[in-house]
Image: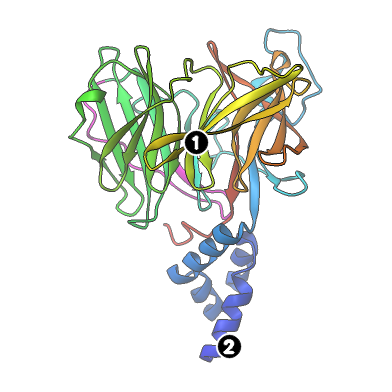
Amino acid sequence: MAFTLRKKEILIDILVRLPAKSLVRFLCTCKSWSDLIGSSSFVSIHVNRNVTKHAHVYLLCLHHPNFERQNDNDDPYDIEELQWSLFSNETFEQFSKLSHPLESTEQYRIYGASNGLVCISDEILNFDSPIHIWNPSIRKFRTPPMSTNINMKFSHVALQFGFHPGVNDYKAVRIMRTNKGALAVEVYSLKTDCWKMIEAIPPWLKCTWKHHKGTFFNGVAYHIIEKGPIYSIMSFDSANEEFEEFIAPDDICSLWGLCIDIYKERICLLFDYYPCVEECMEKFDFWILQEKRWKQLCPFIYSSDYCFRTIGISIDNELLLARRGFDQGIADLCLCNYESKQVLETDIKLAVMRYGEIESLFAINYIESLVLFNDH
């Protein structure tokens, strides 16, 4: 049945409001609906609406589904118990479990999420770790080809993933170095399905440095790096392939308690290190990157009864905090409004992952989309 222009506009306005899983089911309704929902223009309209209106948003967490059952060994929780899941961003009820797209039983880690896509790979990255770009909403994924640019083994690998609006492409940025300081940077493009080695490495990166936490925003990968006594934020634009360095504020003297994320469309740093002068209170120091300079905001002060640790910042600019219970291998996820200081408990039991002396927790926002729908 042929649609008039007006009927088609009304239909699009209705369908674009639906979650991705419902739209996939509608593909069997008729050919015209299938052609419409599967078109690149509809996929773009759907994801843009979800992003701008924060529709069909979930919390993506690594958690303990059976947190009350403990064992007698050094790790009170079996590794098999850890589960990646989507939780409602409003009620915090579990929405769905996320199993590996290749049905692997090995634990995996998420290295970025954007517009319904997540980038997953091994828990401990190697230079040859397989990478998967996955849309769990529609159960589609793509596995980038193995890079042919690497001719040596690297001891340290960092991976970031996200969307670059300037070139309308999804990028994965992999930064690798050896123990002797040799450095390599590669960029994967979802549009071209290939890797590119970055040749021009700035002199200030051609040294021994340690990469730590990072984030991805508007096509730019950001990493906290440590060069001797100096802490910096390294940025790399995945489109124009330019590096930039931002020296961290002088007050940042340790990587412990340091978090980098996005707050109100700006790169920010949260630092849980210094004691609060107020009795029975704790604090996070807070900076945003504004016009290539760090601007310090008012510290976030809270009761010491909570004993929080910073995980990141939500899509609604709320602090994602973990109430410490690390000795038991769990931490309670809480959301806190930076301005009102109101704390909201979610009852989600995050898993505390340990890699030597490093403890890691994971909770981010995930937005449903149809991206990768037409991938074969």
Quarter of the image for residue 54 reads: bottom right
- Image coordinates of residue 305 in percent, x first then y, are 79, 21
Q: What x and y, as percent, mark residue 7?
A: 58, 88
Q: Quick one: 174 or 130, which is closer to the camera? A: 174
Please give the residue where the numbered disc 1 appears in the rendered image: 268
The kind of residue tagged 1 is Cys
Total marks drawn? 2
Nearer to me, 58 or 67: 58
Tag 2: residue type?
Lys
Residue at coordinates 48% horizontally, 20% vertically from top-left? Answer: 251
Residue drawn at x 50%, y 36% is 268
> In terms of depth relative to the viewer, which is nearer, 288 or 66?
288
Residue shown at the point (62%, 70%) measured from the top left: 26
Q: Overall secondary structure of the magenta stretch? A: loop
Whether residue 132 is in magenta: the answer is yes
Question: Label 2 belongs to which residue?
Answer: 7
From where the camera sits, is residue 3 visible?
no
Q: Nearer the viewer, residue 282 or 10?
A: 282
The answer to whether residue 348 is above or below residue 309 is below
Q: Badge 1: few (under 14), some or many (20 or more) residues near its Cα, within 10 Å?
A: many
**Magenta region: which residues?**
129-152
Whether residue 52 is situated above or below residue 363 in the rendered picture = below
Query: Which image quadrant: the C terminus?
Result: bottom left
Frontmost of labels 2 and 1 is 1
Q: What numbered label is drawn on residue 16?
A: none
